[in-house]
Protein backbone atom coordinates (compact mmCIF):
# COMPACT_ATOMS: atom_id res chain seq x y z
CA UNK A 1 0.00 0.00 0.00
CA UNK A 2 2.88 2.28 0.87
CA UNK A 3 4.56 1.54 -2.45
CA UNK A 4 1.34 2.31 -4.34
CA UNK A 5 0.97 5.64 -2.56
CA UNK A 6 4.61 6.46 -3.35
CA UNK A 7 4.08 5.74 -7.06
CA UNK A 8 0.93 7.90 -7.01
CA UNK A 9 2.79 10.78 -5.41
CA UNK A 10 5.67 10.39 -7.87
CA UNK A 11 3.32 10.39 -10.84
CA UNK A 12 1.53 13.47 -9.50
CA UNK A 13 4.90 15.21 -9.32
CA UNK A 14 5.87 14.26 -12.88
CA UNK A 15 2.52 14.98 -14.50
CA UNK A 16 2.67 18.80 -14.23
CA UNK A 17 6.13 18.78 -15.78
CA UNK A 18 4.88 16.72 -18.70
CA UNK A 19 1.62 18.71 -18.87
CA UNK A 20 -0.25 15.41 -19.25
CA UNK A 21 -4.00 15.37 -18.57
CA UNK A 22 -5.36 12.69 -16.29
CA UNK A 23 -7.10 10.84 -19.11
CA UNK A 24 -3.90 10.57 -21.18
CA UNK A 25 -2.23 7.85 -19.07
CA UNK A 26 -5.14 5.36 -19.23
CA UNK A 27 -5.55 6.10 -22.95
CA UNK A 28 -1.88 5.37 -23.62
CA UNK A 29 -2.03 2.17 -21.58
CA UNK A 30 -5.18 0.95 -23.35
CA UNK A 31 -3.74 1.76 -26.77
CA UNK A 32 -0.48 -0.01 -25.87
CA UNK A 33 -2.37 -3.07 -24.66
CA UNK A 34 -4.50 -3.20 -27.79
CA UNK A 35 -1.42 -2.85 -29.98
CA UNK A 36 0.34 -5.62 -28.07
CA UNK A 37 -2.60 -7.97 -28.57
CA UNK A 38 -2.74 -7.10 -32.27
CA UNK A 39 0.99 -7.71 -32.74
CA UNK A 40 0.81 -10.98 -30.82
CA UNK A 41 -2.06 -12.30 -32.94
CA UNK A 42 -0.44 -11.25 -36.22
CA UNK A 43 3.17 -12.07 -35.43
CA UNK A 44 3.29 -14.75 -38.15
CA UNK A 45 2.10 -12.30 -40.79
CA UNK A 46 4.71 -9.75 -39.70
CA UNK A 47 7.41 -12.40 -39.96
CA UNK A 48 6.26 -13.35 -43.46
CA UNK A 49 6.27 -9.67 -44.44
CA UNK A 50 9.83 -9.28 -43.16
CA UNK A 51 10.84 -12.43 -45.05
CA UNK A 52 9.31 -11.10 -48.27
CA UNK A 53 11.05 -7.76 -47.72
CA UNK A 54 14.38 -9.52 -47.19
CA UNK A 55 13.88 -11.61 -50.34
CA UNK A 56 12.93 -8.50 -52.31
CA UNK A 57 16.04 -6.67 -51.13
CA UNK A 58 18.25 -9.62 -51.97
CA UNK A 59 16.63 -9.90 -55.39
CA UNK A 60 17.08 -6.18 -56.00
CA UNK A 61 20.74 -6.50 -55.01
CA UNK A 62 21.15 -9.27 -57.56
CA UNK A 63 19.43 -7.15 -60.21
CA UNK A 64 21.84 -4.27 -59.56
CA UNK A 65 24.87 -6.40 -60.29
CA UNK A 66 27.49 -4.16 -61.96
CA UNK A 67 28.29 -6.86 -64.50
CA UNK A 68 24.71 -6.67 -65.79
CA UNK A 69 24.49 -2.88 -65.60
CA UNK A 70 27.56 -2.58 -67.80
CA UNK A 71 25.81 -4.28 -70.73
CA UNK A 72 22.20 -3.27 -70.08
CA UNK A 73 20.50 -1.34 -72.90
CA UNK A 74 18.59 1.83 -71.84
CA UNK A 75 14.90 0.92 -71.93
CA UNK A 76 13.51 4.33 -72.73
CA UNK A 77 10.58 5.20 -74.98
CA UNK A 78 12.74 4.98 -78.11
CA UNK A 79 13.78 1.43 -77.19
CA UNK A 80 10.17 0.45 -76.49
CA UNK A 81 8.95 1.87 -79.81
CA UNK A 82 11.62 -0.15 -81.61
CA UNK A 83 10.66 -3.35 -79.81
CA UNK A 84 6.99 -2.71 -80.58
CA UNK A 85 7.85 -2.50 -84.28
CA UNK A 86 6.52 1.04 -84.70
CA UNK A 87 6.95 2.44 -88.24
CA UNK A 88 8.41 5.70 -86.85
CA UNK A 89 11.22 6.70 -84.54
CA UNK A 90 11.10 8.64 -81.28
CA UNK A 91 11.58 12.03 -82.95
CA UNK A 92 8.52 11.51 -85.13
CA UNK A 93 6.61 10.26 -82.09
CA UNK A 94 7.55 13.37 -80.13
CA UNK A 95 6.66 15.69 -83.02
CA UNK A 96 3.23 14.05 -83.36
CA UNK A 97 2.66 14.43 -79.62
CA UNK A 98 3.48 18.14 -79.81
CA UNK A 99 0.94 18.64 -82.61
CA UNK A 100 -1.77 16.70 -80.78
CA UNK A 101 -1.05 18.57 -77.53
CA UNK A 102 -1.32 21.89 -79.40
CA UNK A 103 -4.66 20.80 -80.92
CA UNK A 104 -6.02 19.83 -77.50
CA UNK A 105 -4.92 23.13 -76.03
CA UNK A 106 -6.58 25.14 -78.83
CA UNK A 107 -9.77 23.07 -78.55
CA UNK A 108 -9.90 23.64 -74.80
CA UNK A 109 -9.42 27.38 -75.30
CA UNK A 110 -11.75 28.14 -78.22
CA UNK A 111 -14.41 25.41 -77.88
CA UNK A 112 -14.65 24.83 -74.13
CA UNK A 113 -13.36 28.30 -73.19
CA UNK A 114 -11.49 26.66 -70.34
CA UNK A 115 -8.13 28.23 -69.38
CA UNK A 116 -7.42 25.52 -66.78
CA UNK A 117 -7.89 22.72 -69.28
CA UNK A 118 -5.85 24.67 -71.84
CA UNK A 119 -2.91 24.62 -69.44
CA UNK A 120 -3.06 21.00 -68.26
CA UNK A 121 -4.26 19.16 -71.38
CA UNK A 122 -0.91 19.34 -73.27
CA UNK A 123 0.97 18.10 -70.23
CA UNK A 124 -1.51 15.28 -69.61
CA UNK A 125 -1.36 14.19 -73.25
CA UNK A 126 2.45 14.07 -73.42
CA UNK A 127 2.68 12.11 -70.19
CA UNK A 128 -0.21 9.87 -71.26
CA UNK A 129 1.35 9.05 -74.64
CA UNK A 130 4.67 8.03 -73.10
CA UNK A 131 2.97 5.89 -70.48
CA UNK A 132 0.75 4.37 -73.16
CA UNK A 133 3.87 3.23 -75.03
CA UNK A 134 5.20 1.75 -71.80
CA UNK A 135 1.93 -0.11 -71.18
CA UNK A 136 1.84 -1.46 -74.73
CA UNK A 137 5.45 -2.58 -74.40
CA UNK A 138 4.73 -4.39 -71.14
CA UNK A 139 1.59 -6.10 -72.48
CA UNK A 140 2.73 -6.98 -76.01
CA UNK A 141 6.49 -7.47 -75.70
CA UNK A 142 7.64 -7.87 -72.12
CA UNK A 143 4.75 -10.12 -71.12
CA UNK A 144 5.67 -12.51 -73.94
CA UNK A 145 9.33 -12.39 -72.98
CA UNK A 146 8.46 -13.09 -69.34
CA UNK A 147 6.28 -16.10 -70.13
CA UNK A 148 8.80 -17.48 -72.62
CA UNK A 149 11.68 -16.97 -70.17
CA UNK A 150 9.76 -18.91 -67.53
CA UNK A 151 9.21 -21.71 -70.04
CA UNK A 152 12.90 -21.75 -71.00
CA UNK A 153 14.06 -21.92 -67.39
CA UNK A 154 11.61 -24.74 -66.66
CA UNK A 155 12.88 -26.70 -69.66
CA UNK A 156 16.50 -26.02 -68.76
CA UNK A 157 15.94 -27.50 -65.32
CA UNK A 158 14.68 -30.71 -66.96
CA UNK A 159 17.26 -30.94 -69.74
CA UNK A 160 20.26 -30.00 -67.62
CA UNK A 161 19.66 -33.02 -65.40
CA UNK A 162 20.30 -35.22 -68.44
CA UNK A 163 23.09 -33.41 -70.31
CA UNK A 164 24.85 -31.80 -67.31
CA UNK A 165 26.12 -29.13 -69.72
CA UNK A 166 24.43 -25.73 -69.77
CA UNK A 167 25.42 -24.86 -73.34
CA UNK A 168 24.10 -28.16 -74.69
CA UNK A 169 20.95 -27.78 -72.58
CA UNK A 170 20.29 -24.35 -74.13
CA UNK A 171 20.79 -25.78 -77.64
CA UNK A 172 18.27 -28.56 -76.93
CA UNK A 173 15.74 -26.08 -75.52
CA UNK A 174 15.85 -23.72 -78.53
CA UNK A 175 13.58 -25.79 -80.86
CA UNK A 176 10.85 -25.81 -78.19
CA UNK A 177 11.07 -22.08 -77.52
CA UNK A 178 8.72 -19.63 -79.30
CA UNK A 179 9.84 -16.32 -80.75
CA UNK A 180 11.22 -13.79 -79.86
CA UNK A 181 13.04 -15.63 -77.06
CA UNK A 182 14.15 -18.26 -79.54
CA UNK A 183 16.00 -15.66 -81.61
CA UNK A 184 17.80 -14.34 -78.53
CA UNK A 185 18.90 -17.85 -77.53
CA UNK A 186 20.13 -18.52 -81.06
CA UNK A 187 22.23 -15.35 -80.93
CA UNK A 188 23.63 -16.49 -77.57
CA UNK A 189 24.69 -19.89 -78.89
CA UNK A 190 26.12 -18.33 -82.05
CA UNK A 191 28.30 -16.02 -79.96
CA UNK A 192 29.54 -18.87 -77.78
CA UNK A 193 30.69 -20.71 -80.91
CA UNK A 194 33.05 -17.81 -81.78
CA UNK A 195 35.26 -18.66 -78.77
CA UNK A 196 33.85 -15.84 -76.63
CA UNK A 197 33.66 -16.36 -72.89
CA UNK A 198 30.47 -18.26 -72.09
CA UNK A 199 29.76 -16.40 -68.84
CA UNK A 200 30.22 -13.02 -70.51
CA UNK A 201 27.83 -14.04 -73.28
CA UNK A 202 25.30 -15.08 -70.65
CA UNK A 203 25.65 -11.77 -68.81
CA UNK A 204 25.15 -9.71 -71.98
CA UNK A 205 22.18 -11.88 -72.96
CA UNK A 206 20.51 -11.43 -69.56
CA UNK A 207 21.24 -7.70 -69.42
CA UNK A 208 19.52 -7.06 -72.76
CA UNK A 209 16.60 -9.50 -72.53
CA UNK A 210 14.65 -7.35 -70.01
CA UNK A 211 13.59 -10.24 -67.78
CA UNK A 212 14.48 -10.41 -64.11
CA UNK A 213 14.08 -14.20 -63.92
CA UNK A 214 16.76 -14.60 -66.55
CA UNK A 215 18.96 -12.02 -64.83
CA UNK A 216 18.66 -13.85 -61.51
CA UNK A 217 19.37 -17.18 -63.21
CA UNK A 218 22.48 -15.89 -65.00
CA UNK A 219 23.68 -14.16 -61.85
CA UNK A 220 23.42 -17.44 -59.97
CA UNK A 221 25.24 -19.35 -62.74
CA UNK A 222 28.10 -16.84 -62.79
CA UNK A 223 28.45 -16.92 -59.00
CA UNK A 224 28.34 -20.72 -58.93
CA UNK A 225 31.13 -20.80 -61.50
CA UNK A 226 33.20 -18.30 -59.52
CA UNK A 227 32.86 -20.15 -56.21
CA UNK A 228 32.85 -23.69 -57.62
CA UNK A 229 29.34 -24.60 -56.46
CA UNK A 230 26.84 -26.84 -58.25
CA UNK A 231 25.20 -25.05 -61.19
CA UNK A 232 22.53 -27.76 -61.39
CA UNK A 233 21.25 -26.86 -57.94
CA UNK A 234 21.00 -23.21 -58.99
CA UNK A 235 18.94 -24.16 -62.05
CA UNK A 236 16.61 -26.46 -60.11
CA UNK A 237 16.06 -23.98 -57.27
CA UNK A 238 15.40 -21.17 -59.74
CA UNK A 239 12.80 -23.29 -61.55
CA UNK A 240 11.07 -24.11 -58.24
CA UNK A 241 10.89 -20.43 -57.27
CA UNK A 242 9.40 -19.56 -60.67
CA UNK A 243 6.73 -22.27 -60.35
CA UNK A 244 5.69 -21.02 -56.92
CA UNK A 245 5.62 -17.41 -58.04
CA UNK A 246 3.53 -18.23 -61.12
CA UNK A 247 0.91 -19.89 -58.94
CA UNK A 248 0.87 -16.96 -56.52
CA UNK A 249 0.63 -14.47 -59.38
CA UNK A 250 -2.44 -16.20 -60.82
CA UNK A 251 -4.14 -16.09 -57.42
CA UNK A 252 -3.42 -12.37 -57.02
CA UNK A 253 -4.67 -11.58 -60.53
CA UNK A 254 -7.93 -13.42 -59.84
CA UNK A 255 -8.39 -11.48 -56.60
CA UNK A 256 -7.86 -8.08 -58.25
CA UNK A 257 -10.21 -8.62 -61.20
CA UNK A 258 -13.14 -7.09 -59.30
CA UNK A 259 -11.18 -3.95 -58.43
CA UNK A 260 -10.07 -3.43 -62.03
CA UNK A 261 -13.65 -3.88 -63.23
CA UNK A 262 -14.89 -1.17 -60.86
CA UNK A 263 -12.15 1.26 -61.96
CA UNK A 264 -12.88 0.54 -65.63
CA UNK A 265 -16.61 1.16 -65.14
CA UNK A 266 -15.87 4.45 -63.41
CA UNK A 267 -13.52 5.50 -66.24
CA UNK A 268 -16.24 4.85 -68.82
CA UNK A 269 -19.13 6.44 -66.92
CA UNK A 270 -17.32 9.66 -66.08
CA UNK A 271 -16.81 10.96 -69.66
CA UNK A 272 -20.21 9.55 -70.74
CA UNK A 273 -22.05 11.55 -68.06
CA UNK A 274 -20.06 14.67 -68.89
CA UNK A 275 -20.80 14.41 -72.65
CA UNK A 276 -24.48 13.70 -71.94
CA UNK A 277 -24.75 16.86 -69.84
CA UNK A 278 -22.64 18.95 -72.20
CA UNK A 279 -24.58 17.99 -75.35
CA UNK A 280 -28.08 17.51 -73.94
CA UNK A 281 -28.35 20.42 -71.51
CA UNK A 282 -27.78 24.05 -72.50
CA UNK A 283 -27.65 25.13 -68.87
CA UNK A 284 -24.99 22.55 -68.03
CA UNK A 285 -23.00 23.57 -71.11
CA UNK A 286 -23.22 27.19 -70.01
CA UNK A 287 -21.98 26.27 -66.54
CA UNK A 288 -19.09 24.20 -67.91
CA UNK A 289 -17.91 26.87 -70.36
CA UNK A 290 -18.81 30.24 -68.76
CA UNK A 291 -18.47 29.88 -64.99
CA UNK A 292 -15.15 29.63 -63.19
CA UNK A 293 -16.32 26.77 -60.99
CA UNK A 294 -17.60 24.83 -64.00
CA UNK A 295 -14.32 25.29 -65.85
CA UNK A 296 -12.39 24.17 -62.80
CA UNK A 297 -14.69 21.14 -62.48
CA UNK A 298 -14.03 20.10 -66.11
CA UNK A 299 -10.27 20.38 -65.60
CA UNK A 300 -10.57 18.39 -62.39
CA UNK A 301 -12.58 15.67 -64.16
CA UNK A 302 -9.90 15.39 -66.85
CA UNK A 303 -7.24 15.03 -64.17
CA UNK A 304 -9.27 12.41 -62.30
CA UNK A 305 -9.81 10.44 -65.51
CA UNK A 306 -6.08 10.40 -66.18
CA UNK A 307 -5.24 9.37 -62.61
CA UNK A 308 -7.74 6.49 -62.77
CA UNK A 309 -6.17 5.29 -66.01
CA UNK A 310 -2.68 5.66 -64.55
CA UNK A 311 -3.35 3.73 -61.33
CA UNK A 312 -5.34 1.09 -63.19
CA UNK A 313 -2.27 0.36 -65.32
CA UNK A 314 0.31 0.20 -62.55
CA UNK A 315 1.94 -3.17 -62.05
CA UNK A 316 1.15 -3.58 -58.37
CA UNK A 317 2.04 -6.73 -56.46
CA UNK A 318 0.96 -9.13 -59.19
CA UNK A 319 3.02 -7.31 -61.77
CA UNK A 320 6.11 -7.42 -59.59
CA UNK A 321 5.94 -11.19 -59.16
Image: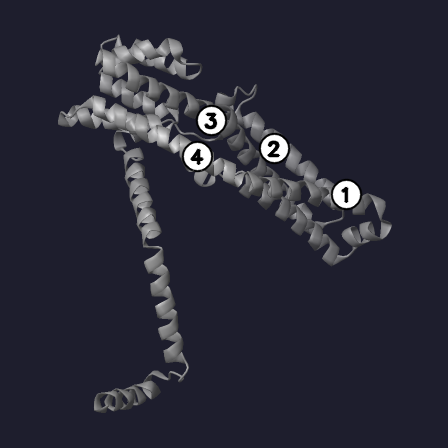
Tell me residue 42's x, y (percent).
Answer: 35, 55
Q: Are marks 2 and 4 in contact (CB under 8 Å)?
A: no
Who comes first in sequence, dot 3 or dot 4?
Answer: 3
Pointer 4 residue: 249
Tell me residue 79's x, y (percent).
Answer: 46, 26
Report how far apart the C-alphas of labels 4 and 1 lie in the structure. Answer: 38 Å
Asked whether, in this view, residue 296 is left or right of residue 85, the answer is right
Residue sitting at x 79%, y 54% = 287
Quarter of the image with the C terminus is top left
Report how far apart the C-alphas of labels 2 and 4 lie in the structure. Answer: 35 Å
Closer to the camera in the image, 287 or 305? 305
Q: Residues within 10 Å of mark 1 (few under 14, many from 20)?
A: few
Whether residue 42 is visible here, answered yes or no, is yes
Mark 1 lies on a secondary structure that is: helix
Which mark is drawn over residue 275?
1
2 vs 1, front mark: 1
Pointer 3 residue: 143
Query: Residue 13 sits in which quadrant?
Result: bottom left
Tell me residue 76's x, y (percent).
Answer: 45, 31
Report how far apart the C-alphas of labels 1 and 3 lie in the structure. Answer: 35 Å
Q: Are marks 2 and 1 in contact (CB under 8 Å)?
A: no
Pointer 2 residue: 97
Amino acid sequence: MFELNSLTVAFDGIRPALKMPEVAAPAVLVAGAAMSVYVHRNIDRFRRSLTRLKDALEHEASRRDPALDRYRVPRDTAYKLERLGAPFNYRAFLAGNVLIALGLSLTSLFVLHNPYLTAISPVLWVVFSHQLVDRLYRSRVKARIDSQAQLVLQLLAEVYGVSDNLRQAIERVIPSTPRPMREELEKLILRTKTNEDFNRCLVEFAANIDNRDMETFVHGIVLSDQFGSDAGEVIVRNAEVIRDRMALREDLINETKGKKAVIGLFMVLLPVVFLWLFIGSGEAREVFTASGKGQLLVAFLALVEYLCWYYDGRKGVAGEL
